[in-house]
Image: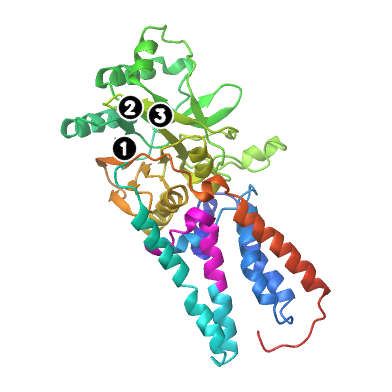
């Protein structure tokens, strides 16, 4: 998994200088190798290997805060075993990484001892029981009569562009969806569906087109766009029919107050060059992969939950993540904590160099976030995979990649807060503390020869 994620993270860099490619490849490799380098250093201490699971989690978690690192969390590899990983609502995906590394540490010791240590074998077998029983318990206790809201998913199968053709295409596909689904409560467009500064003075006609359509359909729409005032941000915004009515009664050029979410984690070198806020000359290294993102973006610093009314006039709360942010567990956890009853991931998967497996790997993070937060999630992509996953990480509807696809599906609304949502940093911080104590103890231990490695 780590090697696959590393490959994905480096693909766009083939289009830039060799110096930048080598620097990023080297730094990412060092990040992933850190726990192994520490383990190798203490390879002659008999119990040193058992510090590895804690070191691994500490490394995974701390690197989510480092701008040059692409999160490569081992626990995502277990997503196809959804009944077995329901405990992610307690520990987050980091608990899965811990379980996988600990299992391998125990297996390594068992093999090195020639399978003669039966107690170790029993410990290994017993590791499968708590996750299994917890999963059975969770499925048994789950509520079955929660309220729902129906969302419409619009996947164009095309790269977003700055011209009106892309917006016309989204509206055409939405009208096509609504012909067969009269009770859709919310339509979701992908990231950068509006490939321009939404309130820019040059785009008044485009805004009016969108406001007119939303006012006529009486259905709210969430979509990705840009905001460019002093700085430029990649944003998500919700326009309700009521807001569209109000906007149509104002002068075309008027910038109206509206709640938006500004993307906080920007993809390195594609959306933002790391450290360019401190060294502006680094902005010249930005990779202009398409005509939508052509300047260095800035990061947002606050979370937003959007509210809308369904056909029964019940108010629903939905939180949005933008593309790359789905790899960061704390964002969905925080959105859930401040009131999101469901989540939407808006993404622009338009790289020509990604394979179908790479797309599916990226989409799998939505299923992990669903288990952690106990929220249904709609993932809406430009080119796929678009999907709806329930709060147990099970895919209920999925599109085909690289083609046009539209569908409507119900999202279950929940107000329950999982243990992980309440305390998202508890388990990784615990691993950091244990790692520190373990390393200090290892430094004080006399190094001696052992047959455990």
Q: Which mark is residue 147?
A: 1
Residue shown at the point (74%, 76%) measured from the top left: 42
Marks 3/1 in contact by CB < 8 Å: the verdict is: no
Query: Is there a contact, CB below 8 Å, between mark 3 and mark 2?
Result: no
Residue drawn 57% across and 34% down? 297
Q: Are marks 2 and 1 in contact (CB under 8 Å)?
A: yes
Vertical order, 154 against 427 (above or below)? above
Which label's residue is closer to the chain start, 3 or 2? 3
Please name the residue that numbered disc 3 is placed on.
194
Q: Find residue 83 and report its horizontal and vertical position in percent.
A: 37, 62
**Residue 445 position by quadrant:** bottom right
Crowd band around label 1 with a 10 angstrom C-alpha radius: few (<14), some (14–19), many (20+): few
| Residue 295 visible in rendering | yes
Tell me how far mark 3 sits from mark 2, CA to CA: 28 Å
Q: Which residue, given by chain and number where applicable, does mark 2 sit on? A: 314
- Relative to 174, 205 lies left or right: right
Tag 3's secondary structure? loop
């Amino acid at each position: 998994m780590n090697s696959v994620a590393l490959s994905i993270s480096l693909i766009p860099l083939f289009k830039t200088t060799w110096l930048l490619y080598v620097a990023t490849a080297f730094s990412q490799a060092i990040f992933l190798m850190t726990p192994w380098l520490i383990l190798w250093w203490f390879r002659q201490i008999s119990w040193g290997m058992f510090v590895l699971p804690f070191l691994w989690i500490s490394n995974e978690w701390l690197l989510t805060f480092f701008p040059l690192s692409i999160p490569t969390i081992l626990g995502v590899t277990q997503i196809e075993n959804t009944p077995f990983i329901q405990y992610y609502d307690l520990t987050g995906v980091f608990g899965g990484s811990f379980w996988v590394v600990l299992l391998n540490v125990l297996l390594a010791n068992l093999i090195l001892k020639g399978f003669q240590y039966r107690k170790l074998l029993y410990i290994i077998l017993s590791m499968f029981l708590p996750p299994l029983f917890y999963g059975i318990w969770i499925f048994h206790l789950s509520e079955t009569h929660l309220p729902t809201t129906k969302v419409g998913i619009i996947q164009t199968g095309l790269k977003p562009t700055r011209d009106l053709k892309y917006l016309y295409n989204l509206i055409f596909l939405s009208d096509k969806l609504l012909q067969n689904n009269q009770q859709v409560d919310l339509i979701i467009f992908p990231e950068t569906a509006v490939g321009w500064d939404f309130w820019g003075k040059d785009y008044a006609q485009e805004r009016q087109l969108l406001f007119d359509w939303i006012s006529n359909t009486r259905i709210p729409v969430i979509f990705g766009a840009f905001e460019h005032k002093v700085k430029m941000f990649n944003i998500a915004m919700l326009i309700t029919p009521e807001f569209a009515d109000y906007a149509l009664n104002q002068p075309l050029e008027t910038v109206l107050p509206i709640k938006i979410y500004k993307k906080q984690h920007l993809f390195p070198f594609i959306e933002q060059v790391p450290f360019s806020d401190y060294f502006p000359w680094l902005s010249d290294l930005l990779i202009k992969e398409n005509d939508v993102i052509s300047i260095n973006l800035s990061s947002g610093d606050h979370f937003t939950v959007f509210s809308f009314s369904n056909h029964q006039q019940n108010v629903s709360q939905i939180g949005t993540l933008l593309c790359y942010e789905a790899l960061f567990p704390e964002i969905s956890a925080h959105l859930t904590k401040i009131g999101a009853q469901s989540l939407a991931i808006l993404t622009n998967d338009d790289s020509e160099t990604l394979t179908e497996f790479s797309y599916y790997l990226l989409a799998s993070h939505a299923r992990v976030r669903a288990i952690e937060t106990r929220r249904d999630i709609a993932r809406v992509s430009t080119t796929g995979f678009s999907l709806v996953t329930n709060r147990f990480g099970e895919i209920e509807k999925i599109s085909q990649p690289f083609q046009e696809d539209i569908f409507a599906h119900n999202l279950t609304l929940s107000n329950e807060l999982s243990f992980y949502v309440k305390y998202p940093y508890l388990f990784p911080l615990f691993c950091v503390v244990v790692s520190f104590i373990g390393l200090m103890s290892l430094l004080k231990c006399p190094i001696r020869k052992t047959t455990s490695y």
